[in-house]
Every structure is written in C-alpha cells, then in structure tokens.
Amino acid sequence: MRKHTIIAAALTAALATPAFAQSTTAPATSAAPHATTTTSATPASGNFLQTQPSSDWRGSKLIGASVYGPDNASIGEINDLIVGTDGKISAVVVGVGGFLGVGQKDVALPFENISVTRKADSASIDKIKVSYTKDQLKNAPKFAYYEPASTSTTTGSGGGMGGTAGGMKSPSTTTTPPATGTAK
C-alpha cells in the first residue's frame, strides 16, 4: 500500500508540472476528450488548477484497480502508469497472470486502449475494461522499465557486499589492510 501511495504522489507531481505552463484558457473541442476550460487566471491564482474535471482520473484511483477483459473476466490490475515528457499518461502497466503477485508479468497497454467508467455520482472507478483477453495479455511481450546503463567500473573480484546497494563497491572505495604486529 505504501508503494501505491508513493507512486501516486510522484504521478501527481509529474502530472501537475505541465499544468503550470498551461495558458489561462484551453479550447474546448469535441475532438479532444480531455479538453477543459479553466477560469481566468490572475497573478494571485498563479495559473493553478482549482478543480479536477469530471473526465480526468486520479492516479491513486487507477493504480491497484482491477482490469477486465471483453468477457468481464478479471485479467489483472494496474501496477503503474507511464507518464510521457508531454505530461500525458502514455501507458498503464498491468500485472497479468500469477497468483498473489508470484509469477505475474507486467504488460504495458497504451492508455487510450483502456476504458474507465465512473460509479454514478462518485469519484470511484466502476470498471476498467480492455479489448484484450487474459490469454492475449499472457502472450503479450513483457514490459521492461527503463534502466540506465551502468557507468561505474569496478575492480577486484567483486562478490561481497561492498558499500553500495547491489553488492558492488564504489570505484572510489579503497580498503586498507589491518596493521600487523599491533596488540589489541
């Protein structure tokens, strides 16, 4: 649960950042499903959003929500959201298969491929549906999170726990052998 809270907080911060650069009004067109209009901004308001439009979703409501296939069978749950540099959610990462998280694999679905419905007169999600079956998602390619290439170099035999996470010694770490011939 703590992981979901941290992810939701990070997502909220990431999604709020582009809002600071928005103009004072956004054109409302029928072609853009998420287009909203905002009230006139004054220097005192600082171009901050003051309310959540009914068409938008909170990350904390999406993460952990069950996802259902076309046959209404549960196919997994949303584990993460991938936010693009444009500030939009580009994909939802769904954990598929396994039991209680064991043997589960992550599959990323484009955000526009999910359908989210709200419970009547509520901020809660009623159902998240996709057009994929559980078998299609089990056979889909596994999603790999971005991992930067390691730029550190190590010397020695490796192995031990060293001074950093993962058991690798930092290149600047040196060890001095104990002095011999001293009494303790």
Image (tube, grey):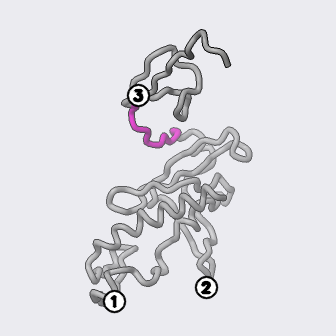
Q: Position of residue 131 (x, y in %)?
A: 54, 56
Q: Is 65 within the magenta?
A: no
Q: What residue is pinned by disc 2?
A: 121
Q: Amino acid at mark 1?
A: Thr
Q: Amino acid at mark 2?
A: Asp
Q: Amino acid at mark 3?
A: Ser
Which numbered mark, 3 or 1, is in the foreground of this view? 3
Mark 3: give few (<14), some (14-19) or many (20+) Cα within 10 Å. Answer: few
Mark 2: give few (<14), some (14-19) or many (20+) Cα within 10 Å. Answer: few
Q: Secondary structure at mark 3?
A: loop
Q: What residue is pinned by disc 1?
A: 39
Q: Residue at x 62, y 62 (%)?
A: 65
Nearest to N terminus: mark 3 or mark 1: 1
Nearest to N terminus: mark 2 or mark 1: 1
Q: Position of residue 23 (x, y in %)?
A: 26, 78
The part of the chain drawn in magenta is 141-150
Q: Residue at x 61, y 85 (%)?
A: 121
**The N terminus, quarter of image:** bottom right
**Is disc 2 in contact with disc 1, using a CB cutoff of under 8 Å?**
no
**The C terminus, quarter of image:** top right
Foreground of the two, 9 or 163: 163
Q: Is residue 54 above or below residue 73?
A: below
Which numbered mark, 2 or 1, is in the foreground of this view? 1
Q: CA distance from mark 2 to mark 3?
A: 59 Å
Marker disc for residue 172: 3
